[in-house]
Image: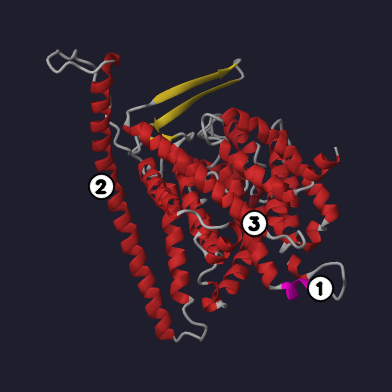
């Protein structure tokens, strides 16, 4: 019993277990048991929120904690003002926000915590799991193995789980192409961090064969998933990291002409990168579609009726399978998002100051509007993380969240660019680039706060590590206080 209590008090173990359980919820063959474990871990996380608040004084040590507290207050107010039958849903996401802010982002409040070991463990696990899943998925795809699993658990849960292909796009062993794309992108991001010397010194080096395998399989997966949002995430990451490298070459002050030339170079390279990547994706998908068609045909010929076909026999005519092109079946570039965003603004107008509460978005859409937000797996959110926060907490909550985000981003950027070459071979630029790219990505997917998923929790995990990085470098700032008291520290603002 004593050992169990010590395990339950281990916040680092919770973060590692929770993020990997979230990943498991995206793998079709472990999806349902992972969801069951998630419920238990959610309760564990809530216990740690309150336990750590007493043990570490989490709120008082948290960077920009006053803005966090004010935002959480608006979340509660929006639930009470727009009281409805969906209150339990809104309250659940309020509790989820506590875990995001106090356990993941608040990792920097834990004293003497070496986050590098935790980061190394999680990064390696993601690289191995996602790479193996994508490799197995690609092999099955080349052998023409495709199936739709119809799930019906006693009539309580019904779903269709695609295996390798979903709506003409590669999905492999994961639940849909967009999730596959994000998982593959984070695997490459983790690999990039693991290539940095400081992290290698802590958790060891990944074998070169795994590096090559990870790069190839995950790039293939991103291209074949045809996930535009993931493509935006990857390109934004490369552009931000490129910008850092251009402007951190030297510590001395840049001249106006030098800054202009570097900015122009970044813009030109970024434009070339975007257009060349789009062209390459089209060419690659077309070529891979032809390869897949050929390999599937060969497998069908070899294993037809369980026997090798006699070269002198006649092959009975069969219905030709539909060719997979790895392109969206929905030819609209926005994939229906503009309709959701438009109605999202209409829902926002119902309570523009404090919002309607997350649980009421679909409910109010059905009652007061034409119901673009439907009760299904594809339309339960605005597919825009920032817009969802605006609708849920209104202009007041959105402003407070933006102030928190701006203060954090400004602090990270100052800390990063003022150090010049100091971080050149470190992983802080990687984390800053990912967080910046993620904000761009959040305009197109269910992200940031109102999602109990790997997509959302990975963001808060990296944000917590970035804040810990800064705190370890700037301990003096945490000793200053507001109003000449010992109650509130300057870091809260």
Local SS, label 1 = loop
State the image coordinates of residue 63 (x, y, percent, origin top left): 72, 64
Q: Magenta residues?
A: 475-480
Q: Mark 3 = which residue? A: 117
Query: Would residue 256 be counted in the magenta stretch?
Result: no
Seen in the image, is 341 located left or right of residue 264?
Answer: right
Residue positioned 43% across, 38% down in the render: 177
Q: In the picture, residue 287 is in which quadrant? A: top left
Q: Mark 1 = which residue? A: 481
- For the residues labelled 1 and 2, the Cα–Cα distance comes to 58 Å
Q: Residue furthest left?
A: 312
Residue positioned 62% across, 44% down in the render: 19
- For the residues labelled 1 and 3, the Cα–Cα distance comes to 31 Å
Please say if 263 is above or below 203: below
- For the residues labelled 2 and 3, the Cα–Cα distance comes to 41 Å
Q: Mark 2 = which residue? A: 283
Residue positioned 23% across, 32% down in the render: 294
Query: Would residue 476 be counted in the magenta stretch?
Result: yes
């Amino acid at each position: 019993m004593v050992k169990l209590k010590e395990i339950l008090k281990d916040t680092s173990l919770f973060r590692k277990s929770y993020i990997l359980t979230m990943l498991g919820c995206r793998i079709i063959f472990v999806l349902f048991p992972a969801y069951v474990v998630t419920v238990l871990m959610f309760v564990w996380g809530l216990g740690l929120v309150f336990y750590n608040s007493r043990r570490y004084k989490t709120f008082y040590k948290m960077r920009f904690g006053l803005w966090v507290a004010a935002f959480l207050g608006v979340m509660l107010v929006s639930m009470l003002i727009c009281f409805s039958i969906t209150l339990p849903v809104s309250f659940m996401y309020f509790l989820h926000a506590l875990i995001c802010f106090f356990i993941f982002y608040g990792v920097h409040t834990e004293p003497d915590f070496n986050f590098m070991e935790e980061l190394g463990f999680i990064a390696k696990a993601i690289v191995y799991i996602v790479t193996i899943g994508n490799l197995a998925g690609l092999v099955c795809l080349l052998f023409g193995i495709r199936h739709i699993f119809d799930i019906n658990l006693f009539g309580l849960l019904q779903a269709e789980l695609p295996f390798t292909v979903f709506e003409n796009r590669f999905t492999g062993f994961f639940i849909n192409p967009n999730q596959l794309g994000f998982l593959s992108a984070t695997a490459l991001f983790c690999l990039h961090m693991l290539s940095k010397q400081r992290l290698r010194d802590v958790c060891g080096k990944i074998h070169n064969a795994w590096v090559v395998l990870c790069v190839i399989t995950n790039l293939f997966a991103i291209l074949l998933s045809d996930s535009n949002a993931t493509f935006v995430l990857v390109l934004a990451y490369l552009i931000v990291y490129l910008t850092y490298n251009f402007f951190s070459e030297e510590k001395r002050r840049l001249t106006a002409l030098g800054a202009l030339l570097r900015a122009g170079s970044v813009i030109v390279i970024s434009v070339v990168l975007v257009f060349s990547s789009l062209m390459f994706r089209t060419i690659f998908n077309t070529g891979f579609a032809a390869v897949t068609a050929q390999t599937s045909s060969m497998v069908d010929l070899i294993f037809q009726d369980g026997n090798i076909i006699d070269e002198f026999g006649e092959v009975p005519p069969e219905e030709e399978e539909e060719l997979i092109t790895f392109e969206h079946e929905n030819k609209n570039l926005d994939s229906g998002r503009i309709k959701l965003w438009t109605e999202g603004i209409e829902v926002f107008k119902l309570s523009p100051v404090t919002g309607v509460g997350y649980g009421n978005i679909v409910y109010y859409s059905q009652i007061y509007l034409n119901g673009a937000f439907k009760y299904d797996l594809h339309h339960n959110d605005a597919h825009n993380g920032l817009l969802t926060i605006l609708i849920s907490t209104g202009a007041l909550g959105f402003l407070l969240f933006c102030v928190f985000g701006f203060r954090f981003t400004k602090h990270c950027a100052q800390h990063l660019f003022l150090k010049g070459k100091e971080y050149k071979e470190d992983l802080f630029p990687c984390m800053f680039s990912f967080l910046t790219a993620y904000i761009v990505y959040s305009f197109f997917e269910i992200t940031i706060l109102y999602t109990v998923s790997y997509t959302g929790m990975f963001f808060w995990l990296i944000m917590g590590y970035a804040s810990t990085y800064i705190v370890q470098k700037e301990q003096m700032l945490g000793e200053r206080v507001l109003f000449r008291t010992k109650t509130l520290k300057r870091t809260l603002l």
